[in-house]
Amino acid sequence: IIFTSLQTALKENPDLVKNYFSQAVNLNESKFVALHYSLFNNGVFVYVPSGVELTIPLRNQIFALESGGLFNHTIIVLEPESKASFIEEMISPFKENQALHTEAVEIFVNDGANLKFLSLQSWGQNVYNFAHKKAIVSKDSNLDFTFALFGSKFTKLNLDMILNGEGCSVRNYGVYFGIKDQDFHMHTNAVHKVPHTKYDILNKGVLLDQANAVHRGMI
């Protein structure tokens, strides 16, 4: 398998990376995605060959010590009949100065593959967080996508699930916990390209103080 930084993967496997880079999350998705592609400075590349089943979850932890800008890009590719679990954690201490994080996650689950993806966000409450995550799920494959939002001053999360092959299924679970004046905006979209596909979604949250949450979705 390949599990390395995106910068290393671009040097060691440029042709492989170019097959998937910006193929799910297009740079024209929004002005924040365009900003992300122009400035991305961190990332990870995961490639699981056909038939390989990983028994230990892969984990990527993003820890920001200083205020400023962080632009993280993740690409995950599962070839046919493979299986993997991936955990991403985003953590930072509270700082008085504002900080910006933009993220793009591109997931490709090919025929008969199975992926469990868990995203844990616990940024300090000075961070403005814009994330766009998109998965392309192929024939007879399965994706369990779970996110948890606990941190940041403001988060806008776009989740796009493209059900691209008959017999595929996506389960999307989310939880958020807001305090003080935190603001969470969640946009979930499921695109059924072919018949005989399945999509389940369940999001739950708790809001205290003046915290706010908005959830929009389209199937």
Image: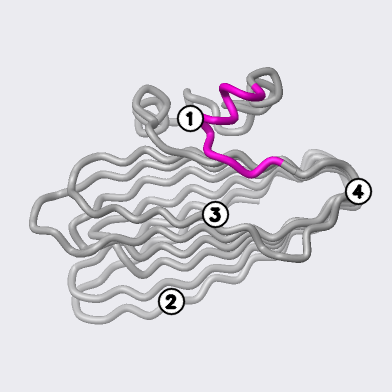
Residue 167 falls left or right of residue 59: right
Say which amino acid is labelled 1.
Answer: Glu
First along the sequence among labels 3 and 4? 4
Residue position marked by numbered label 4 in the rendering: 51
Q: Identify the residue at horizontal 25%, vertical 39% (top origin).
A: 69
Residue 217 is tagged as: 3
The image quarter in which residue 105 lies: top right
Q: Identify the residue at horizontal 31%, vertical 41% (top origin).
A: 70
Between label 3 and label 2, give the one nearer the viewer: 2
Secondary structure at numbered mark 3: strand
First along the sequence among labels 4 and 1? 1
Task: Please determine whether, in this image, residue 202 is positioned above or below residue 68.
Answer: below
Distance between the Cα atoms at labels 1 and 2?
27 Å
Say which amino acid is labelled 2.
Answer: Gly
First along the sequence among labels 3 and 1? 1
Which residues are drawn in magenta? 2-13
Residue 29 is tagged as: 1
User: Is 39 covered by the magenta stretch?
Assistant: no
Residue position marked by numbered label 2 in the rendering: 205
Between label 3 and label 1, give the one nearer the viewer: 1
Say which amino acid is labelled 3.
Answer: Gly
Q: What crowding class fits label 3: few (fewer than 14 Cα within 10 Å), some (14-19), or many (20 or more)? A: few
